[in-house]
Image (spheres, rainbow, N blue to C red):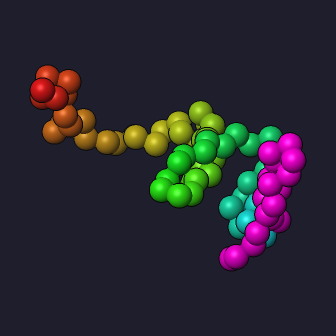
Amino acid sequence: MSDAAVLSSKFQISIPKAVRTARGWVAGQEFVFIPKGAGVMLVPVPTLEKLRGIAKGADPTGYRDRRDRY
């Protein structure tokens, strides 16, 4: 997928339809911009409903604690 977009005078970019469709992105969805080298990663912010149950069954033993940071 090598679609391109142009930054408008109002600093807006339209995400190409092929990219939106492939990723399942919809209007009104929230995103985060993460600087990465000379570029930027565009990452969708998950909703609480999507995160619910994500750690179900996780084993909390063996995780770092604040005591071992120094």
Snapshot quadrant of residue 4: bottom right
Find the magenta span and give its range.
1-17
Residue sitting at x 49%, y 53%: 36
Residue sitting at x 40%, y 40%: 55
- As drawn, which residue projects farthest toward the right? 9
Snapshot quadrant of residue 64: top left
Residue 21 at least partly seen: no
On the rendered image, what quadrant is the C terminus found in?
Answer: top left
Tell me which secondary structure the magenta stretch mostly adopts. Answer: loop
Query: Where residue 3 sits in the image (x, y, percent)?
Result: 75, 72
Residue 5 part of the magenta segment: yes
Query: Where residue 6 sits in the image (x, y, percent)?
Result: 81, 60
Q: Is residue 14 above or below residue 69?
A: below
As rendered, which of 66 and 51 lies closer to the eye? 66
Residue sitting at x 74%, y 54%: 25
As rendered, which of 62 and 36 lies closer to the eye? 36
Query: Where residue 63 sits in the image (x, y, percent)?
Result: 20, 37
